[in-house]
Image (cartoon, helix red, strand yellow):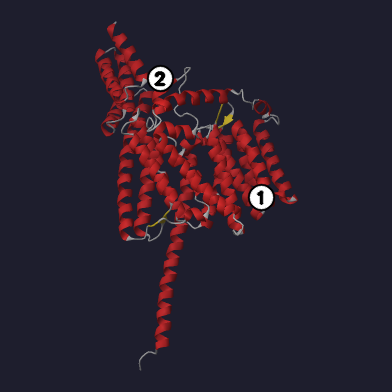
Amino acid sequence: MGETGCGAGFRTARRFAGKAGGAASKGAFFQLALSVCLGVLLAIGAIFQGFFVETAYLPLLTVLWLGFGVAVTFFKSGKLSIVPVLIALMAILYGISASYGADREQAMLETAKLSLLLPFALLFSWLPEWRRWHLLRVIPWIGAGLTAAGALLHLERKGRLESFLEYANALAILLLVALLICLFLYMKESRVRDLLLLAANGAGLLLTFSRSVWVLWLVSVLAVLLLFPELRKRKPLVFVGLGHLSSWLLASAVKRDPLFFVQRVKSIQPEASELQIRLIYWRDSLNIVRHSWWRGTGGGGWGMLQHLYQSQAYYVKYVHNQYLQILLDTGIPGLLVWLALIAVFYETAGKAAFRADGQGERKYWAKASLLLVSVMLLHAGFDFDLSFPLLLFLLVGMMLMPESVHRPAISLRPPGVRIGLGVLSLCVAVIGFWFAGGYLEKVEGVNLVLAGKLQEAGIHLQSAENTLPWSHSAKYESAKRYVLLGNTTKDRTYYEAARAELKAALKLAPQDELYASLLNDLNKAMQK
């Protein structure tokens, strides 16, 4: 007897339900795995100097783009919102600047560094909103780990805690973000664990002696009191106060002095030397902007050209102002894209935070993201912390927190789109692998020179030159090696080789003051 219509219908429904359940299970597993991988990435970045040096971020470029390529090719998921589009446009502008920049090698490296953001932003945005906030819970643990490692291993410079980031101000802003995340979590969940993490991160922040971030710390706590009624209740206010008091006690125990911070606090004033020298950087940089305001000087152009415009002798690789840095690097177009990225975040997060009919949870975390992003953007106005890819990841992640930012502009489900992105990922990964190999060879050669193994160093430096024919820095390191060989053997041919390398470096970077000075000194020495 044939199956009835109802029986067939129930069987069909069960079959589709099974498929939907399998798809949901696969999607949940993908999101969990993605969340874990991104969390591990952030933890690794904290250990490896925030991915600041090329031997850290170039290998990461390969790994991250390969991971993105696998995800977009084999998982029918994902969407493309305006934030990743703007990030891609920024990377393109930096890439274009390498064709005309004053320091083309550095422009290519800055492009590679910025290119890390695109796959991170896309992968992060594929997570549901609750997993995104869950992922950022790892930041307080990272901050506490950096504080503990720095204190135990004495990773400091001039008495200021630097830990593995090797820059006190960058560590300070990361610790402030971690502390605020602890504060938001405690107000919402009232867990003692978050207070303990708050104390640990606060102690590390005090030990950095970063006056600018201390000021932001005070402003941030006042802003939390103003924006979040949850903190204006007696119990959370008392316990958060105790958490801050514990921070001071921990830092005092490390310094063995309860008044260790007093002199640093007294020096917070407009006449502070750090602020005055930054004002000089900014004023001098405006002279460069006047000549290259439309397209900029290319990534790294400030470092190459500053000696032509500076009002006194100094050298800094970055201008200590993210907005000026982008203007110097990519001109007005780059700055407009950066400001558009910021405007998109504030528009969407502002709606989620202050819309009258908004949901309680979403309003709470949207306000939290507004404050966290504002803290980082304010600090970027007078330092170069966003030159650390780890901190850029953190900033973009917080910009993607509000669900409204997650609204898709382009679906990544069509096979053609996924295959195209997979091919792009493979190409970028290959380029990253190529760059990483060359710069690792250069670093190995430099280390061998420092160890006195000059002959062995030559193999690695020559390999770097062959792999990176555009690299003036590799040629400069080879020149220094030849000079040392000449000094050791008194063989004039080594000086000739050094002069040839310096001429080649100057051809690639004709405005480099150091190369020109060393070549001039070498020519004088050879004429004697």
Does the image show residue 16?
A: yes
Q: Quick check: 42 left or right of 451?
A: right
Q: Which mark is residue 228?
A: 1
Amino acid bearing label 1: Phe
Could you classify mark 1 by the number of other residues whose Cα lies within 10 Å: few (under 14), some (14-19), or many (20 or more)?
some
Label 1: which secondary element: loop
Observer-nearest of 402 and 453: 402
**Residue 162 appearing in the image:** no
On-image quarter of the N terminus: bottom left
The residue at the point 31 percent across, 29 percent down is 471
Q: Could you say where residue 501 lies in the image, as x and y percent from the top left? A: 28, 21
Instruction: Determine the image quadrant of residue 112.
Output: top left
Proximity of marks 2 and 1: CB atoms separated by less than 8 Å: no
Labelled disc at residue 308: 2
Total of numbered circles in the picture? 2
How far is disc 2 from disc 1 in space, using C-alphas? 50 Å
